[in-house]
Structure formats: structure tokens, C-alpha cells
Amino acid sequence: MRVLGDPMLPLTNNAAERQLRHWVIARRISYGTRTLVGSNSLSLLASVIDTCRLRGASATNLLARAISAARLGLAAPALPPIAPHLLGRNGALMGI
């Protein structure tokens, strides 16, 4: 019911469904993963890739830095910041 209090929020979840569509198709084509670890790895990778894409950052660069940090025993790099034009009132993320 948050949509009633904030007119900037979309009335449907069509944007979220469109964003997940290519991952669902990839899962269908590849017959999914075989283990829980594989499923968790794919969902994490998909989340990082889509987050970078929405924030206008390179997922490849972020993943390369994360792998380099892991090899050196360092913490993973932070996700890129949210662009100011994507933030609404009170710093909340606006519907895309």
C-alpha cells in the first residue's frame, strides 16, 4: 500500500518482471543449475550485474576488482553509488 502514500512509485511490478526476463530465459535454455551453491552463485552474479547496469557502472570492472581482492585476501569492493537522479524524496530509490 506504499504506492498510495507516494505517487512516484509505479502501480505495477512490470519493470521488475522485464528486468528478470533475460535471466529466466537463460535459466530455461541452460536447464538451470545443478546445486544450491550454483543457484546461489548465479543469483548473486545476476544481482551484481543488474545493479551495476542500473547504476551506470561496469560490472566487468567490479567483478575483476572483486576477484583480485579475493586472491589477495582483501574485502570485496563496494557496489557503485546510486546516481542522484535515481533518488527520490528522503533519499529513497525511485521506481524505474
Image (cartoon, helix red, strand yellow):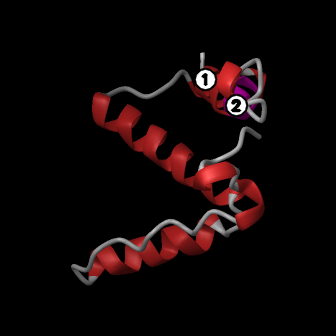
Q: Residues within 10 Å of mark 1 (few under 14, many from 20)?
A: few
Residue occupying the point 41% across, 74% down: 77
Identify the residue at horizontal 62%, vertical 20% (top origin).
28
Front in this rendered view, residue 7 or 35: 7
Residue located farthest toward the front when viewing the structure as drawn: 5
Name the dominant secondary structure of the magenta segment.
helix
Cα–Cα gap, marks 2 and 1: 6 Å
Looking at the rendering, the stretch of residues picked out in magenta corresponds to: 17-22
Amino acid at pointer 1: Arg
**Count of marks, rendered view:** 2
Q: Residue at x 66, y 25 (%)?
A: 5
Residue placed furthest toward the bottom: 72
Q: Quadrant of residue 3?
A: top right
Q: Quadrant of the N terminus?
A: top right
Mark 2: give few (<14), some (14-19) or many (20+) Cα within 10 Å: few
- What SS does tag 1 mark? helix
Which residue is label 2 attached to? Answer: 6
Judging by the rendered image, the residue that carries numbered circle 1 is 2
Quarter holding the C terminus? top right
At 72% from the left and 27% from the top, the residue drawn is: 21
Type of residue at label 2? Asp
| Quarter of the image where one finds residue 7 | top right
> Where in the figure is residue 68, as x and y percent of width and height?
39, 80
Left or right relative to 21: residue 61:
left
Image coordinates for residue 31, horizontal then vertical, percent: 54, 21
Q: Pointer 2 and pointer 1: residues touching (CB < 8 Å)?
A: yes
